[in-house]
Image: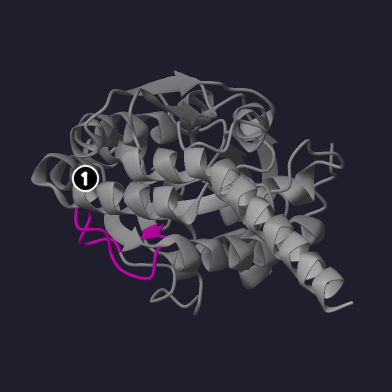
């Protein structure tokens, strides 16, 4: 009886040893991969066509990120469906850290605009780090006889539904910035969507639309040339490249804050070790003069937001934009 019991115990111990060995063998490649990462090219998916702001900030960080990682980093533009095509590529990619997403506000906006998404922004990504934010700027055509936000609000209230504002399209950060402005001021301005920021800006210059909230960088040349009038920026702090332009918050819209942010995200199953290596490399790259100065020249605030705070930030942005989109009557596609 004792002999049978000892044999049974040996069998159990043998089975446990085999199980542990099997688990160790299964985990060994992943652990080795994490320790040696990266060993080949890393691809950053930009979910928009070349030339836009998100593409520009990706290409600014790319050379320095490549130097920090010690392996080639390539930019792959996968535009379409408001950023959802490129996001889906990364959400379903192998969880090895070699396919990353240039994360941007569409991840917080799309769940409220599309009835069906092939990915879940809060579940299918690991947020590696945020490295920059760019304010939008409220601009008007010079023919609009206002010099500040208070005068604009009074002018709009005297002419409900008579003026137009332009945007790069439904659900974009500039459109939602404008809708937030309308909601906070109780004004009625007609939305005219365009196929991109370029055509919308052209319409503003021609006074086909009278006002616009746009990403700051492309508007700076027009502002400095006097072709449009800047009334306020949408961040809580003034922009260093437009120090004389107040914020909407200090112009009377307390708590108004909208920024076009950007960072890196990976598939949700990527190991913690790889995520931390990526974040460290991203932070060093963004802090380098080669990147910091080029981003600052374009009105961007360079930040270092790690994985957990970045995740919380995306959650908060997702919760914030839902009611604004609903109140604006923007119908999901």
Q: Position of residue 180 (x, y in %)?
A: 62, 62
Instruction: Give the overall secondary structure of the magenta segment.
Output: loop
Q: Is residue 138 visible in this depiction of the protein?
A: no
Magenta region: 232-245
Camera-nearest residue between 42 and 259:
42
Whether residue 61 is visible to the viewer of this picture, yes or no, is yes
Q: Where residue 3 sits: x, y (%)?
A: 81, 72
Q: Is residue 173 magenta?
A: no
* Label 1 SS: helix
Q: Which residue position is annotated with label 1?
A: 285
Q: Residues within 10 Å of mark 1 (few under 14, many from 20)?
A: many
Residue nearest the observer in this picture, 27 or 184 = 27
- Report the side of 168 relative to 70 (left or right): right
Q: Quadrant of the N terminus?
A: bottom right
Tell me, yes or no, whether the highlighted magenta stretch contains residue 244: yes
- Which residue is situated farthest in the right direction here? 1
Residue drawn at (33%, 28%) of the image = 39
109 left or right of 274?
right
Instruction: Give x and y (percent) for residue 165.
Output: 60, 43
Q: Is 50 drawn above or below residue 112 in the view shown?
A: above
């Amino acid at each position: 009886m004792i002999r049978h019991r000892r044999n049974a115990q040996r069998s159990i111990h043998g089975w446990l040893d085999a199980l542990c060995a099997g688990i160790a063998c299964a985990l060994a490649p992943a652990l080795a991969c994490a320790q040696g990462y990266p060993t080949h090219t890393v691809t950053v998916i930009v979910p928009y066509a070349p030339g836009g702001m998100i593409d520009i900030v990706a290409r600014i960080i790319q050379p320095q990120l490549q130097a920090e990682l010690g392996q080639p980093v390539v930019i792959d533009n996968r535009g379409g469906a408001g950023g959802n095509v490129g996001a889906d590529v990364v959400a379903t990619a192998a969880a090895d850290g070699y396919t990353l997403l240039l994360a941007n506000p569409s991840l917080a906006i799309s769940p409220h605009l599309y009835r069906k998404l092939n990915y879940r922004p809060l579940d299918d990504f690991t947020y590696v780090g945020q490295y920059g934010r760019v304010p939008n700027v409220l601009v008007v055509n010079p023919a609009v006889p206002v010099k500040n936000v208070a005068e604009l609000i009074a002018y709009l209230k005297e002419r409900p539904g008579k003026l137009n504002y332009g945007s790069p399209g439904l659900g974009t950060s500039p459109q939602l910035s404008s809708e937030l402005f309308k909601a906070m001021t109780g004004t009625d301005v007609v939305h005219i969507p365009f196929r991109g920021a370029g055509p919308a800006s052209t319409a503003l210059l021609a006074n086909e639309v009278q006002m616009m909230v746009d990403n700051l960088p492309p508007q700076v040349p027009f502002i400095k040339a006097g072709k449009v009038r800047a009334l306020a920026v949408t961040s809580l702090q003034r922009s260093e490249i437009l120090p004389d332009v107040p914020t909407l918050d200090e112009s009377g819209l307390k708590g108004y804050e909208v920024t076009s942010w950007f960072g890196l995200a990976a598939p949700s199953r990527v190991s913690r070790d790889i995520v931390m290596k990526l974040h460290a490399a991203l932070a060093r790259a963004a802090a380098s003069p080669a990147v910091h100065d080029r981003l600052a020249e374009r009105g961007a605030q360079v930040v270092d937001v790690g994985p957990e705070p970045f995740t919380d930030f995306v959650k908060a942005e997702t919760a914030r934009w839902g009611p604004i989109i609903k109140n604006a009557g923007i119908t999901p596609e």
